[in-house]
Image (cartoon, rainbow, N blue to C red):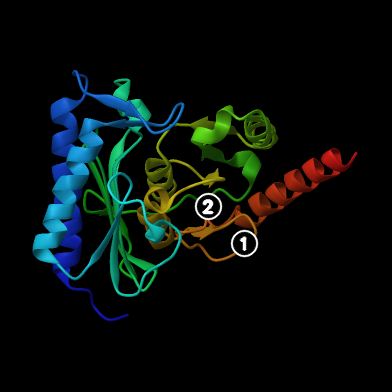
Amino acid sequence: MTTLDPLLLATAIEAVQKAGAIQMTHFGGPMRIDKKGAIDLVTEVDVAVERMFRALIAERFPDHLVLGEELQQDDLRHRTAPGYCWVFDPIDGTTNFAHGLPIFCASLGLELDGDAIVAAVYDPTRRELFTAEKGQGARLNGERLAVTQADSVMDSLLVTGFPYTVQQPEIGEELVALFGHFLGRSRAVRRLGSAALDLCYVAAGRMDGFYEATLKPWDSCAGALLVEEAGGTVTDWTGTRFQSRLPQVLATNGRIHAEMLALLTEFQARRTRGQAD
């Protein structure tokens, strides 16, 4: 792959660290909190961070597209775009952030013709900066990352998340059943509330596998590149190559990927048979 312009990664790092500084200025204090849905929150800090980021990209790369969670709801959410597109979540883990729980981050991926080439995720409460460039590996605060060597799900620590539609009975019941399906076949399953950090933790060897059913591009774009560059595997639930616009994501150390795909297939087959009965 052609060497990337170093300004791209430098901009990504600058953006997420500035985001973290804004987040920490407001964290634990009073803030305006609105609802996008019954349990889907957005704070004034989400909006302020995204405005900062859009201004930075407009000044530095005026011909680049930006897909952010809060300020632009258009078809970029559903299609990849030609050229450069920055995919940004100003606060991944907004519910945690709004409740004073220190598990959140800013997540930023840069796509070129639909493929992620740069990633930066910053957790300001732990001062952990996760970065990756396509073909150049993944790093945490400058140190090279590698996925775990666990070779069975029973020996693995898994992590997942639930969508904001979880309160719909049919969706909630299925997700809880799937959680139990993996809980009985793994060492443990965690639910932290930040998909971007979940993916970073797979890349860092803190988790062995991550699955989630309904992610948005800004949730998965950066983290998926980090997992791949740390030596892991990322697909959808059928084994199809990862694309940020696909809602289902399975990210593992690679060694347990086939087994987790088989368990997902087994679960879905059981549910289909149950509904038919």
Residue under the image location 68 percent in, 35 percent down? 174
Looking at marks 1 and 2 on the same chain, the residue that comes earlier in the sequence is marked by: 1
Residue designated by label 1:
239
Count neighbours of disc 1 (C-alpha within 10 A) and say few if under 14, some if 14 to 19, many if 20 or more: some
Q: Quadrant of residue 175?
A: top right
Determine whether 10 is above or below 69 in the image.
below
Query: Going by the image, does 115 lie left or right of 132?
Result: right
Q: Are marks 1 and 2 in contact (CB under 8 Å)?
A: no
Residue designated by label 2:
247
Residue 115 image point, x, y percent: 39, 69
Q: Which quarter of the rendered picture does the N terminus lie within?
A: bottom left
Of residues 190 and 49, the one nearer the viewer is 49
Query: Going by the image, does 102 lie left or right of 177?
Result: left
Of residues 193 and 142, the one nearer the viewer is 193
Which residue is at the far right? Answer: 277
What amino acid does circle 1 point to? Answer: Gly
Of residues 153 and 78, the one nearer the viewer is 78
Residue 271 image point, x, y percent: 78, 41
What amino acid does circle 2 point to? Answer: Pro
Residue under the image location 35 percent in, 51 percent down? 73
Q: Label for residue 155?
A: none
Residue 25 image point, x, y percent: 13, 28
Q: Which quarter of the rendered picture does the C terminus lie within?
A: top right
Residue under the image location 60 percent in, 52 percent down? 256
Determine whether 189 is above or below 232 in the image.
above
